[in-house]
Image: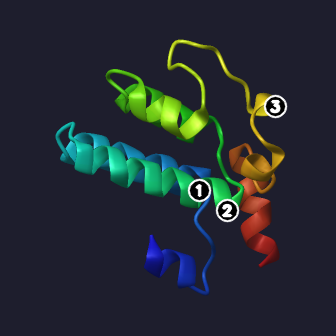
Amino acid sequence: LVELGESPHGSPDQVTYGTYLKVIANQMPASNARSQIVQAVFKKCARSGVVGEMVLRQLRDMSIKGETYKKCVGKSVHDEISLHELPSSWTCNIVEGKRKRRRQFRRQ
């Protein structure tokens, strides 16, 4: 993610972070180390303003006991949460939908 963040080709978006979280879920067993990595990735995602549905879904799916999800989002994994309930700074740079993302990259 560091290399991608410094790349002249674009910045990580919600799909990038969601996919990265899925890789962590598939490649790392549940542990304190995984929880810390997930929290660090989520914080970076939130600072970038790209916490979208995919990120929340991956975070929810990998939170077996819900502790990591609650630490990141501040709500139980069982609570329904919409993007509008999150701080606007977490979602301010989301580009939803394939067509909109394509247009975004054409402009760069």
Which residue is rendered at x = 65% and y = 46% of the image? 51
Against 98, residue 59 (above or below) is above
Amino acid at dot 3: His
Q: Secondary structure at mark 3?
A: helix
Give the residue drawn at x 45%, y 81%. 3
Q: What element does badge 2 sit on?
A: helix
What separation in Å lies between label 1 and label 3 (alpha carbons)? 16 Å
Kind of residue sitting beneath label 1:
Cys
What is the x, y in percent for residue 67? 40, 28
Q: Which mark is residue 45?
A: 1
SS label for mark 1:
helix
Give how far across and how far down residue 5 sits, in percent. 55, 76
Sequence-first tag of 2 and 3: 2
Instruction: Give the number of the disc on residue 35.
Output: none
Asked if residue 95 can be seen in this view, the reply is no
By what rule are the colours in the image chosen? Answer: rainbow
Residue type at mark 2: give it. Answer: Ser
Q: Would you call the spot at circle 3 few (<14 residues within 10 Å), some (14-19), or many (20 or more)? A: few
The residue at 72%/43% (across/down) is: 97
- CB under 8 Å between callouts 2 and 3? no
Q: Nearer the viewer, residue 76 or 103?
A: 76
- Image marks 2 and 1: residues in contact by CB distance under 8 Å: yes
Q: Tell me: residue 88, above or below residue 59.
A: below
Residue where numbered disc 2 is placed: 48
